[in-house]
Amino acid sequence: MEVKVLDINGKETGRKVQLSDSVFAIEPNKHAVYLDVKQYLANQRQGNHKAKERAEVAGSTRKIKKQKGTGTARAGSAKNPLFKGGGTVFGPRPRSYSFKLNKNLKRLARKSALSLKVNESNLVVVEDFTFETPSTKNFINVLKSLGLENKKSLFVLGDTNKNVYLSSRNLKASSVVTTSELSTYAILNAKSLVLLEGAVDGIEANLSK
């Protein structure tokens, strides 16, 4: 599959890049995508929630009333979960929400996400570029030239480029990652996916193993 290469002004360079059908044109596996996104979101959870249980609540352990003759249910402690200020029954405890997925499934999920972007015509290939100094204004001009100023976009770089990354950091709707940082969630979370020309080989190498 061939895709036209654009420059940062949004114009065609006259060159085309060959995208591997085994990475960018597969039948999307929605269940693999679901599992990978679920794992990503689960890994973001801190899991430090905690409620005090009966043994942890501050209070006296003295029996608060006599066992019989009150006409009400027997009670032995003010920490009883039935009383105000008592402990919580089966409350949340600190835990990890992370779970494992095998590498082949995660690769399948990323290839499915990339193929979905191609099917939706939301994937663009742009020639490699950089800035002399970090400049949010220059990055906004690139977005405008590509027609992405009002869209959520993800730029994928072949190698780390500090100036391009810093230029995009103040923009909530745009993010910049390298091929090694690319995730299924990041691909699907963006409306438009912009691949720099140098990132194509890296993506295909990572997903063709």
Image (cartoon, rainbow, N blue to C red):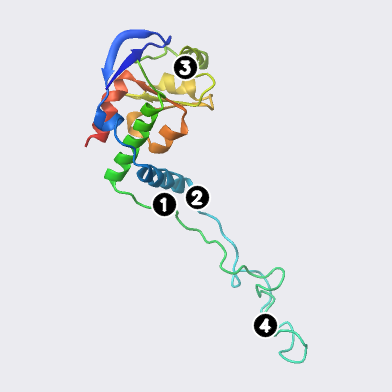
Tell me where residue 162 appears, x and y as whole percent: 41, 22
Q: Nearer the viewer, residue 42 or 20?
A: 20
Q: Is residue 170 above or below residue 82?
A: above
Marks 4/2: CA–CA distance = 36 Å
Residue holding disc 4? 76
- Is any atom of residue 66 visible in this view? yes
Sequence-wise, the earlier of marks 1 and 2 is 2
Q: Is residue 91 above or below residue 196?
A: below
Residue type marked 4? Gly
Identify which residue is drawn at 48% across, 19% down: 167
Foreground mark, 3 or 2, reads: 2
* Mark 1 and mark 4 residues within 8 Å of each other at the beta carbon: no
Residue type marked 3? Pro
Residue that extends furthest to the bottom in the rendered view of this protein: 69
Marks 3/2: CA–CA distance = 33 Å
Residue type marked 2? Gln
Sequence-wise, the earlier of marks 1 and 4 is 4
Identify which residue is drawn at 33% across, 8% down: 13
Sequence-wise, the earlier of marks 3 and 2 is 2
Marks 1/4: CA–CA distance = 40 Å
Tell me where residue 193 appears, x and y as whole percent: 41, 25
Residue holding disc 3? 134
Residue type marked 1? Ser
Residue holding disc 2? 46
Residue holding disc 1? 98
Q: Which numbered dot is residue 199?
A: none
Badge 3 crowding class, 10 Å Cα cut-off, few under 14, some 14 to 19, many 20 or more, is some
Secondary structure of residue under mark 3 = loop
Sequence-wise, the earlier of marks 3 and 4 is 4
